[in-house]
Amino acid sequence: ESQNFIPPETLTDKERVVWDWLVGIFRETVNCRVSDADVHLMELYCRAKVATDEADAELKKDPRAYTIVALGYDKDGKPKTTAKPNPNLKKRLNNANLCIKLFDQLGLSPIARARAGLKSANAKSELDIFKELMERTDD
């Protein structure tokens, strides 16, 4: 399978930094199961990671769970307001969850790595049993 990992032209500068980091991980991974067929998952991960970081940065500036929004004025000329959920909380939560799912699909989460290691260990175990059967003698 091809592993050129050519970055999509639509990535922003911040997304490209994440892309380069991700490709670096795949290049260092022995028996990497990711190929160019997974470029779209990688692209989605980059976008979700940057969106998570942006929402997190905004929450550091304004960590309130609710923000006050002006609605105009009442009949007496007093300002009317309402409280709305801070949109950065939802943005961070949704994109962080997407990052976790994509990380798992790309084989990078601890669980995904454990599954791959277990499959590899089981495959080696089966091969060793088969090898022993092939090398036996009927003496």
Image (cartoon, helix red, strand yellow):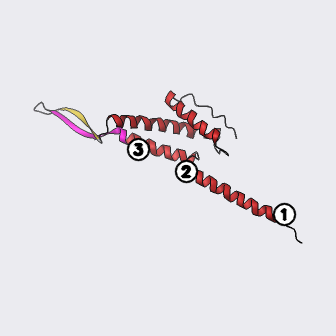
The one nearer the camera, 35 or 116, is 116
- Mark sitting earlier along the chain (1/2): 2
CB contact under 8 Å: marks 2 and 3: no
- Residue 43: where, in percent of width, then height? 55, 36
Residue at the outermost right position: 139
Pointer 2: what residue?
A: 110
Q: Is residue 58 magenta?
A: no
Q: Is residue 39 visible?
A: no
Mark 3 residue crowding within 10 angstroms, few (<14) / some (14–19) / many (20+): some
- Residue 31: where, in percent of width, then height? 67, 46
Amino acid type, callout 2: Pro
113 shown above or below 44: below
Q: CA distance from mark 2 to mark 3?
A: 20 Å
Residue at the outermost bottom position: 139
Please give the label number shown on residue 93.
Answer: 3
- Residue 27: where, in percent of width, then height? 64, 38
Q: Is residue 106 visible?
A: yes
12 shown above or below 49: above
Which residue corresponds to the image point at 57% horizontal and 33% vertical from the top-left? Answer: 20
- Mark sitting earlier along the chain (1/3): 3
Pointer 1: what residue?
A: 135
Mark 1 residue crowding within 10 angstroms, few (<14) / some (14–19) / many (20+): few
- Residue 35: where, in percent of width, then height? 65, 40
Which of pointers 1 and 3 indicates the residue nearer the eye? 1
Q: Position of 74 compared to 89: left or right? A: left
Which residue corresponds to the image point at 60% horizontal and 39% vertical from the top-left? Answer: 25
Residue range in magenta is 76-89
In terms of image quadrants, where is residue 77? top left
